[in-house]
Amino acid sequence: MSLRSLSSVLALAMTAGLLAAAPVGCTGKPDTGETGAETGDDTDVPATENCTNTTDDDADGAVDCDDADCAAHATCATPTTETECANKVDDDEDGALDCADTDCASAPECQLTGTEGACLDGNDNDVDGLVDCDDPDCASEPNCVKEPVELACADGADEDRDGLIDCADPDCVAASNCAE
């Protein structure tokens, strides 16, 4: 059958309603009428990124906050000030962490008291780099008084605060309960 004959048969079939003409998309395949970017498989995708659904909505290879389209989205924006001053995270990514960040200068947890204050809370309350009993401010705290030697070699305490307890401390080598 010649091309001209085939064309005539198709035109006649379309006129009779046996074939419907479908618009062709940019992929060369029939277009379904969906909106968005053509992907090549006749599945259109939205032209914009949804910044909170863990999906590459605009098919550009970047998902949510990694997509440049989401840079100004509230979920993706880097805070411009330190948001928490005691979380050990540089929230505003300016290189200054917590109390070392000028954004935290007025935060209660960053107020310098001049002394450690609480000597058994595990925190450096006066922000001098020394915590609790290691801070000279706590020298008079009864739980921080350092004995020159281990006083009792079977009490489970480290009286001389050298990190060695009872029989593990060389101060107890002569103790009867530590002899091997």
Image (cartoon, rainbow, N blue to C red):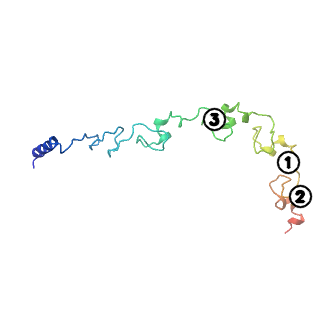
Q: Quadrant of the C terminus?
A: bottom right
Inter-mark Cα distance, 3 to 1: 35 Å
Can you give x and y, in whole percent of width and height, for residue 28 in the image?
26, 43
| Quarter residue 3 falls in | top left
Look at 13% across and 43% down and name the residue there: 12
Can you give x and y, in whole percent of width and height, for residue 136 in the image?
83, 41
| Closer-to-camera residue (81/58) | 58
What residue does disc 1 label?
143
Instruction: Identify which amino acid the numbered label 1 is placed on.
Output: Asn
What residue does disc 2 label?
152
Secondary-structure class at tag 3: loop
Q: Is residue 152 above or below residue 2?
A: below
Instruction: Identify which amino acid the numbered label 3 is placed on.
Output: Thr
Q: Is residue 2 above or below residue 167?
A: above
Look at 87% across and 65% down and name the residue there: 177
Can you give x and y, in whole percent of width and height, for residue 166 in the image?
84, 59
Can you give x and y, in whole percent of width and height, for residue 121 in the image?
77, 44
**Would you say 168 lies left or right of 105 here?**
right
Q: Are marks 3 and 1 in contact (CB under 8 Å)?
A: no
Instruction: Identify which amino acid the numbered label 2 is placed on.
Output: Ala
